[in-house]
Image (tube, rainbow, N blue to C red):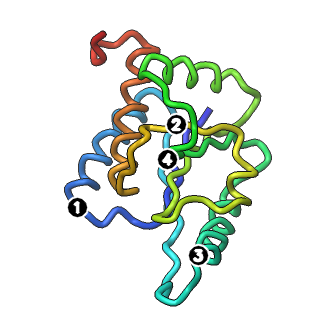
Amino acid sequence: MKIILLQVGKTTDPSVSAVAETYSRRISRYSGFETITVPDIRNTKNMPVSELKAREGEKILQVLTSDDYFVLLDERGPEYRTVEFARFLEKTFMLPRKRIIFAVGGAWGFSDEVRGRADSRVSLSKMTFPHQLVRLLFLEQLYRAFTIIKGDPYHHE
């Protein structure tokens, strides 16, 4: 099963991009992996937040197929210890789906339509982080989960 990180907007900090690329390469050793970036909505200064989220949501939903297992990275989801997240990932791999798509929303979060399509949610923390940093945190945790599943030395507990 292929894993996709679906994100809204480019990562603009070159140092964050470099570390994200490092973890993406590491993850690719364990599973098919790809990052898909949905473009930011432009000229939002006078746009209501609900419209912005709806327009971003349309772009997110266009990426999905009915064969995808869609997971929102959302502070309202359950929090897992890393070992628990690895078990969640293992169980998800057993589902009859072609891709697992983990989505990082934009600055204002997800539209109701995107939330309605989600098969699951995962919270990285109850704290709020910039969405560019969430990408990096998630990639590291995904890599760590794979090392746990495969028994490779990286995670210490």
Q: Earlier in the sequence, mark 3 or mark 1?
A: 1
Q: Are marks 4 and 2 in contact (CB under 8 Å)?
A: yes
Q: Amino acid at mark 2?
A: Gly
Q: Secondary structure at mark 1?
A: helix
Q: Amino acid at mark 1?
A: Pro
Q: Earlier in the sequence, mark 4 or mark 1?
A: 1
Q: Earlier in the sequence, mark 1 or mark 2?
A: 1
* Foreground pick, 6 / 22: 6
Mark in front: 3 vs 1: 3
Q: Residue at x 43, y 22 (%)?
A: 81
Mark in front: 1 vs 2: 1
Measured as percent of width and height from the top left, residue 79 is found at 50, 30
Q: Are marks 3 and 1 in contact (CB under 8 Å)?
A: no
Q: Which residue is mark 2?
A: 32
Q: Is residue 70 left or right of residue 106?
A: right
Q: Secondary structure at mark 3?
A: helix
Q: Which residue is mark 1?
A: 14
Residue at mark 4 to residue at mark 2: CA–CA distance: 7 Å
Which quadrant is home to the N terminus? top right
- Mark 1: few/some/many CA within 10 Å (<14, 14-19, 20+): few
Residue at mark 2 to residue at mark 3: CA–CA distance: 31 Å
Q: Which residue is mark 3?
A: 52
- Mark 4: few/some/many CA within 10 Å (<14, 14-19, 20+): some
